[in-house]
Image (tube, rainbow, N blue to C red):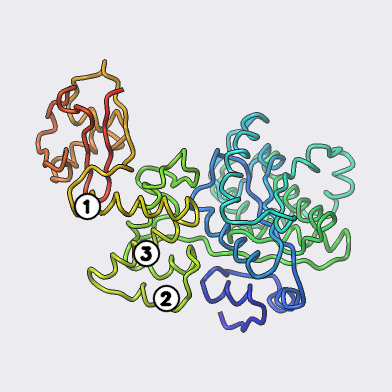
Amino acid sequence: MTYHAKSDFMRIMIERGFLADCTDYQALDDALSEGPVTAYIGYDATAASLHVGHLLNVMMLRWFQKTGNRPITLMGGGTTKVGDPSFRADERPLLGPDQIQANIDGMQQVFARYLDYGDQRALMLNNAEWLDGLNYLDFLRDVGRHFSVNRMLSFESVKSRLDREQSLSFLEFNYMILQAYDFLELYRRYDCRLQMGGSDQWGNIVNGIDLTRRVLDREIWGLTSPLLTTSDGRKMGKSQGGAVWLNGDMLSPYEFWQFWRNTTDADVGRFLKLYTELPVEECDRLGALQGSEINEAKVRLANEVTALLHGAEAAASAEATAREVFEQGGTGGDLEVVTIPAGTLPLSITQLLAQTGITASGKEAKRLIAEGGLRLNNESVNDPQHSIDASTIGDGMKVSVGRKKHRMVQIG
């Protein structure tokens, strides 16, 4: 990035690696320099919690507020009823209104950890407020006429689906019009002049800018962040166990901490810049450490990210548990507990691992045991038929899968 920013927000976005593209660097930077700007990011309610893949944009909103601006978190109570088709191979399952509201309730828990909503310094909105009451014919006449189907078909998110000859429903095709309308409404209601999102949202963001210009003759802007992958090519926010959830009741603070502690060496410096508020110079210093020293940088990363989401006490507790488990061979008070019904015992260790979800399947469990990667209460197990009964588990049995994944198995 060669652009030299004047505003604090743009400078931070560039220095810390948040910025993928912007519709007008100069105009946005000038507006940010002149005074507070209102910006939004939209979140469709497709699950009961945000996950680590959302955290990059949540941090963007946090920096936006910290530099004196007003962020909007827009919950997609309306757009979730349609489903964003961007870069998906198939249509999203349609959710009912009760499930959508339950998901919104779950997702909202996270934002209060990162943003200050007091005195309207940040706004939490729901696009169902203006989408649910739309009259279809009026909407087609007033909004739909501004959209070219030819142009909509040219967007990569749609084009890639059609090129693979995968069905794109008319319902999904309307999604980009509804998202564009969100931007127009937010400008009308709250003078919101900036939409941010991942780079996969570029087409949707541009549509909103174009619609606002056509309807109101006003200039607004878009800014996107990169779609992150780890240095080994995995999509950020995915682990072997699935999504890394941000709600503590869906993923324990210890497991969240452990996800960051397991960061690949090559990603440490980059993740420190994106997911913590440590000075850039300190992020670079920690990321450049070599050998065993890089492990302390990973602990610092895990502590900083966990403290932002779950609080400093949870981060310190997770670190203490990890040190006890790894360095002292203890059981660790914060380990996730997996309960096995008494009536299912006895089981082979292979069956127990598969049934409790500690491994994805019995086949994976057998491979793990063959490679010497399984320990029960810190003792290696080499027999896939090793029997587990109530006396084996006792008050609790620690299961260690590899060096970094640990569970406590108890009888329910």
Identify residue for label 2.
Answer: 282
Q: Give whichever of 126, 225 is nearer the camera.
A: 126
- Quarter of the figure with residue 289: bottom left
Closer to the chain start, of discs 2 and 3, is 2
Residue identified by numbered label 3: 300
- Mark 2 falls on what kind of element? helix
> Seen in the image, is 375 located left or right of residue 26?
left
Q: Which residue is located at x 61 percent, y 31 percent?
A: 99
Q: How many C-alpha atoms fall within 10 Å of the one at disc 1: few (<14), some, or many (≥20)?
A: some
Residue 276 circle label? none
Residue bearing mark 1:
326
Sequence-wise first label, 2 or 1: 2
For this orientation, the residue located farthest to the top is 343
> Which mark is first along the chain, 3 or 1?
3
Name the residue: 32% across, 35% down: 337
Residue 339 position within the rendered picture, expressed as x and y whole percent measured from the top left = 31, 28
Q: Which picture quadrant has residue 271?
A: bottom left
Q: Is residue 293 left or right of residue 165?
A: left
- Specify whether 12 is left or right of 292: right
Label 2 CA crowd tier, 10 Å (few <14, some 14–19, many 20+): few
Amino acid type at image mark 2: Glu
Closer to us: 75 or 280: 280
